Image (spheres, rainbow, N blue to C red):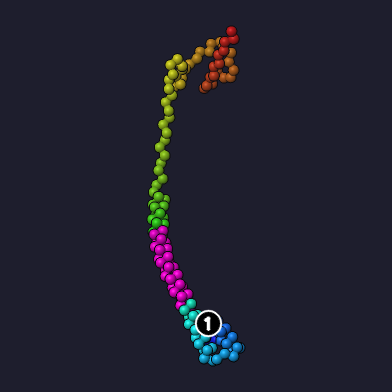
Amino acid sequence: MSPTRLLRIFPTALLGLALACDSGSDPEAVKQAIGSAVQDNLAGVKDQLAEVKTSVDGMHGSQAALQEKLSANTAAIEQLSAKIDELAAAPAPTPTPTPTPTPTVRPGRPDPAVTYKVALGDAQTRGSNTALVTIVEWSDFQ
């Protein structure tokens, strides 16, 4: 294992070693201290590894659930696309013509379905005598 990797994994142990060497301690005591620090760090690393494994397992479970949802949504999209294609291929419905309402005859009023002839006699007129439409206006100034 490289020294750089050891520094990343066991920083406390190396710090303890440096302090022990500076203080002139007994080599066996330093060895014991380093071994203890390494064991503590190793236990911490094992705990972190267990947490990472649990997290990864949770992610795999989430990934499986997401994959199932994705598959279900993909199937739904395919069904909707088929339905859209089916509707696009079907002939457009022809609109049914709305029937012309028959005018209602109100008592005491002229029937709107009948054409009436009005004799003008010597009444004052304007325009051609052979016009297709004649508008008659009557008024009483009494």
**Percent from the top left, x then y, of residue 107?**
43, 16
Quadrant housing the C terminus = top right
| Residue 101 visible in the displayed image | yes
Residue 45 against residue 117 in the figure, above or below: below
Residue at 41% across / 57% down in the picture? 77
User: In front: 102, or 21?
Assistant: 21
User: In front: 10, or 55?
Assistant: 10
Relative to 14, is 81 on the left or the right?
left
Q: What element carries label 1?
A: loop
Please check the rendered image and state whether residue 58 is part of the magenta-colored stretch, yes or no: yes
Predominant secondary structure, magenta span: helix
**Percent from the top left, x then y, of residue 64?**
40, 66
- For the magenta stretch, what is the residue range? 45-73
Kind of residue sitting beneath label 1? Phe
Please check the rendered image and state whether residue 38 is part of the magenta-colored stretch, yes or no: no
| Residue 130 visible in the displayed image | no
| Residue, disc 1 | 10
**Percent from the top left, x then y, of residue 71?**
39, 62
Residue at 50% across / 14% down in the picture? 118
Residue 38 against residue 118 in the figure, above or below: below
**Percent from the top left, x then y, of residue 119?**
51, 13
